[in-house]
Image (cartoon, rainbow, N blue to C red):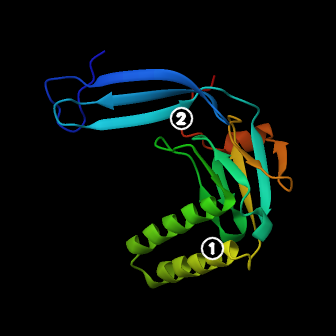
Amino acid sequence: MKIDCPLCHGQKSLDISTHLEKIPYFGEVMESTLICHECGYRYSDVLCLDQGDPMRYSLWVESETLNARVVKSQSATIKIPELGLKVEPGPRSTAYISNIEGVIERFQAAVKMALKLFEDEKAQERSLNLLEDLKKVRNGEKKVKVILEDPMGQSFIAHPKASKRRLTSEEIKKLKTGFITIER
């Protein structure tokens, strides 16, 4: 199969390499790399191949739960309902391993980026309030719940205080996966 480089559209096709590997917490994954030797374009992606039961994890964030391990696959939705924050998977969604504090940092970075884009005063004020609330969460001054939902069952929150349950079929239908799926 010949794939043209999306950057230079050169005469040479992209070199594509893939390999399978077992990674702790994720199971079997396939790593793909595309390289254009003409312009230097490079793209890498990791796809989780193992699938588990569709699960929902939740954890109240307090000082003692900030270090709880979070494994988020590319198919997971993560949200903080008390602050109206939600990140859903898209075609470029990535998996990561972090802790609750790292998840809060990711939300902070996203709000800071959005703050630069907003010009209207209300949106700017809302963003600044969100940043203040997220700072309070990280300092243990505000209690919120982090919810992680994964229809592919590849994500989890590891902490004794975390609750987990299987997602219902109705909940699964409402979730995005980040993948193109075919329903029959």
Mark 2 surroundings within 10 Å by alpha-carbon count, few (fewer than 14), some (14 through 19), many (20 or more): few
Q: Are marks 1 and 2 in contact (CB under 8 Å)?
A: no
Q: Quadrant of the C terminus?
A: top right
* Above or below, comparing residue 172 to residue 132 in the picture: above
Q: Percent x, y for residue 84?
A: 65, 67
Q: Percent x, y for residue 132?
A: 60, 80
Q: Amino acid at mark 2?
A: Phe
- Residue at 23 percent across and 27 percent down: it is 4
- Residue at 58 percent across and 50 percent down: it is 88
Q: Which mark is residue 134?
A: 1
**Visible residue check, residue 180:** no
Q: Amino acid at mark 1?
A: Leu
Q: How many numbered dots are placed on residues in this image? A: 2
Quarter holding residue 23: top right
- 125 sits to left or right of 169: left
- Residue at 26 percent across and 25 percent down: it is 14
